[in-house]
């Protein structure tokens, strides 16, 4: 496993890479607030299974560029970043797998560049049809005056400062709510922020080693959270950009992997996936798993991905 810097689509991304450069290409897109490091178990497993694997710190994260312009984090630009990575290694096509917000890229990129992908998949976020109204408006309609973390993240400043105040406490809280902690995602509009709604467990989950936890804390202490939060601030721009994409549906093999205890799936049901995916499609639910699948169930996720990719080739 090696790390290198790649210039793509006007930004420079730090990329974790493994496997034979001549093997079928797989690109792994992390979610919020994660890193290429979040895929380390799967990068190793996929390389061992015969794939060439790239896992970038996506724009705004880790060792990659962090553009100042909020609009620079829209799904079309994020998709172009991935196409640039494919070009950089001289490949025609790749399989694209995302987790959490990385799944927005995985499900979105084939709509803009269908010919560049031979398979796609999303962990923790299924393919969801474009809403009839702008995304933030849809959330306001559903939740009325209640607190919703996605809407709280829209304003630049408060969430940025709150998450960055104590990154260790931020990640302890976020990782603790991965299974069954959905109460913090919405709530009464008490004027408070996001993290106060999540009790600090004071300890790490048993699936995360202290040294691995320190990687997250150190990186986000250095970079802050504004770049990652800007992804959320492009929800309505993404809605505009996907009104008439070059390709309306995904016809290559597709995979969704969820955790049965993931609280975020309450807002992203899987029952409309077939409105987007017209090719072979499979769903795998991991019993008892929460939201942070690559960390919580590394071996199980790796097996599911290898089985899927082997069948899609």
Image: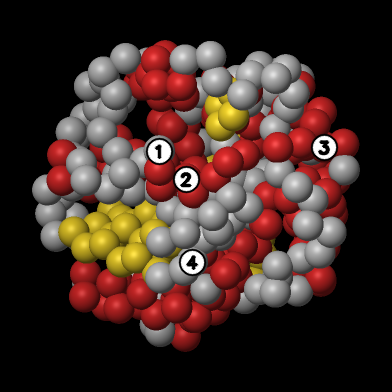
Q: Is 149 on the left or on the right of 118, as rendered?
A: right
Q: Residue furthest bottom?
A: 48
Q: CA distance from mark 4 to mark 1?
A: 17 Å
Mark 2 and mark 1 in contact? Answer it, CB < 8 Å: yes
| Cα gap from disc 3 to disc 1, whole angstroms | 26 Å
Q: Up-down: is 179 above or below 269?
A: below
Horizontally, is 247 left or right of 9 in the view?
left
Res. 303 image quadrant? bottom left
Rendering colour mode = secondary structure
The residue tagged with tag 4: helix, strand or loop?
A: loop
Residue in view at x 82 percent, y 37 percent: 164
Residue on which the image places disc 2? 264
From the viewer's perspective, is 71 left or right of 90? right
Q: Give the mark toward the camera: 3 or 1.
A: 1
The residue identified by callout 3 is: 164
Q: Quadrant of the N terminus?
A: bottom right
- Residue 88 percent across, percent down from the top left: 48, 54
* Numbered disc 2: secondary structure: helix
Q: CA distance from mark 2 to mark 3?
A: 22 Å
How many residues crowd mark 3 within 10 Å: few (<14), some (14–19), many (20+)?
some
State the residue position of label 1.
267
Residue toward you, 144 or 108: 144
Residue 308: quarter of image: bottom left
Q: Is residue 215 above or below residue 133?
A: below
> For mark 4, what is the residue?
289
- Residue at (47, 59) in percent of width and height: 261
Q: Quadrant of the C terminus?
A: bottom left
Measured from the top left, where is residue 263 in percent x and y? 49, 49
Residue 152 seen by the camera: yes
Instruction: Identify the element where label 3 is drawn.
Output: helix
**C-alpha separation, residue under disc 2 versus residue under disc 1:** 6 Å
């Amino acid at each position: 496993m090696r790390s290198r810097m790649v210039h793509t689509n006007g930004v420079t991304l730090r990329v974790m890479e493994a496997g034979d450069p001549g093997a079928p290409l797989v690109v792994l897109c992390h979610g919020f607030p994660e890193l290429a490091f979040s895929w380390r178990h799967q990068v190793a497993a996929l390389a061992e299974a015969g794939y060439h694997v790239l896992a970038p710190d996506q724009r705004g994260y880790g060792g990659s560029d962090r553009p100042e312009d909020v609009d620079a984090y829209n799904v079309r630009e994020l998709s172009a970043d991935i196409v640039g990575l494919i070009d950089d290694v001289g490949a025609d096509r790749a399989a694209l797998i995302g987790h959490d917000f990385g799944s927005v890229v995985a499900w979105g990129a084939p709509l803009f560049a269908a010919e560049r992908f031979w398979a796609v998949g999303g962990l923790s976020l299924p393919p969801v049809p474009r809403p009839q109204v702008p995304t933030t408006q849809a959330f306001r309609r559903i939740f009325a005056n209640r607190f919703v973390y996605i809407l709280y993240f829209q304003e630049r400043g408060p969430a940025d400062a709150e998450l960055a105040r104590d990154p260790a406490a931020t990640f302890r809280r976020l990782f603790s709510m991965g299974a069954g902690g959905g109460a913090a995602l919405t709530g009464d509009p008490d004027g408070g922020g996001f993290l106060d709604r999540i009790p600090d467990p004071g300890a790490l989950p048993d699936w995360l080693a202290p040294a691995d936890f320190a990687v997250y804390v150190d990186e986000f202490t250095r970079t802050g959270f504004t770049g990652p939060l800007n992804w959320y601030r492009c929800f309505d721009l993404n809605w505009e950009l996907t009104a008439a994409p070059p390709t309306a549906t995904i016809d290559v093999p597709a995979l969704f992997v969820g955790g049965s205890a993931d609280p975020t799936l309450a807002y992203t049901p899987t029952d409309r996936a077939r409105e987007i995916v017209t090719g072979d499609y499979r769903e795998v639910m991991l019993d008892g798993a929460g939201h942070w699948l690559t960390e919580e169930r590394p071996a199980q996720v790796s097996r599911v991905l290898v089985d899927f990719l082997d069948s899609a080739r």
